[in-house]
Amino acid sequence: MQTQYRLERPESLLVEDAAGIVTVTLNRPEIHNAFDEILIRDLHALFRAMAGRDDVRALILTGAGSSFSAGGDLNWMKRAAHHSEHDNFEDAMRFSNMMDALYSLPMTTIAKVNGTAMGGGFGLCTCCDIAVASESASFALSEVRLGIIPGVISPYVIQAIGVREAHRWFQTGERIGAAEAQRIGIVHAVHPQEKLDDAVEKMVGEILKSGPDAMRASKALLREIAGRELDDTTRREAAQRIAHQRASAEGREGLAAFLEKRKPNWISR
């Protein structure tokens, strides 16, 4: 089912909404799904709308054609070249807010990287919970080759690959092949192009076996606990969160289903 959202340029984003799984396809294949200010606004609006969708179990993000996203649209970059520092800051914050909206979504997010992911496209990939790529996919933090830096995307990229790896790739701007991307943590799995759809569908099938509330609570737990000092406050917070989930209707159903050797009521297929 193709669902309509209030987008400024709806032809640039295809949104497929089927049985709790939403697929968002960047649809500018003629320019390798590059970003401009309109696409950024539309993605931000879409992700904000998705944040209120309790019925969505997973969101899949991919690109039309041969690329995932080549980063910034050249025409957008030309316009930015004439902006003041303050205008560039405002522009960067709009991009940052869009990426944070994706990163903060309560449902599971999957990047299906069907081709090249450069700059901001690389950043989108690392904003998702899970990333699966085709063998032909490639990645690059090519900003330094343009005399700029991967500023907005840096928190998400560093979280994905770590500081040591970031030191290299931030400096060189080299292309990263799919196998290397998996090794350093950009993506979780790599598959032949012709098997990518099936691999993501299988991943979604695994996701649907898990309790919907528990999955959202697990994402919230990660945001709260990751990077914190392991002290009494952190341990109590973690204990409180599992206690709350165990006492919930979903937690009780999951345990009952396990003990009774049956499927829990959230599994419908």
Image (cartoon, rainbow, N blue to C red):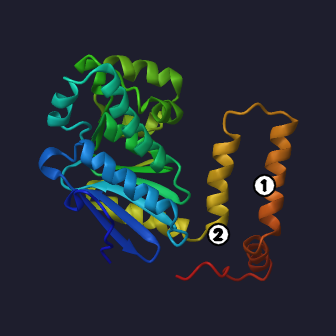
Q: Residue at x 31, y 46 (%)?
A: 40
Measuring from the top left, give residue 158's x and y in whole percent. 50, 30
Q: Residues within 10 Å of mark 2 (few under 14, many from 20)?
A: some
Q: Quadrant of the N terminus?
A: bottom left
Give the side of residue 133 with respect to residue 68, left or right: right
Q: Which residue is mark 1?
A: 241
Q: 39 or 225, which is in the foreground?
A: 39
Q: Amino acid at mark 2?
A: Gly
The quarter of the displayed image where residue 140 is located: top left
Q: CA distance from mark 1 to mark 2?
A: 15 Å
Against 32, residue 198 (above or below) is below
The quarter of the displayed image where residue 198 is located: bottom left
Q: Which residue is mark 2?
A: 211
- Counting labels gives 2
Furthest-left residue in this view: 30
Report the mark closest to the observer, 1 or 2: 1
Give the side of residue 107 with respect to residue 43, left or right: right
Q: Residue at x 47, y 66 (%)?
A: 204
Q: Which mark is residue 121?
A: none
Q: Amino acid at mark 1?
A: Arg
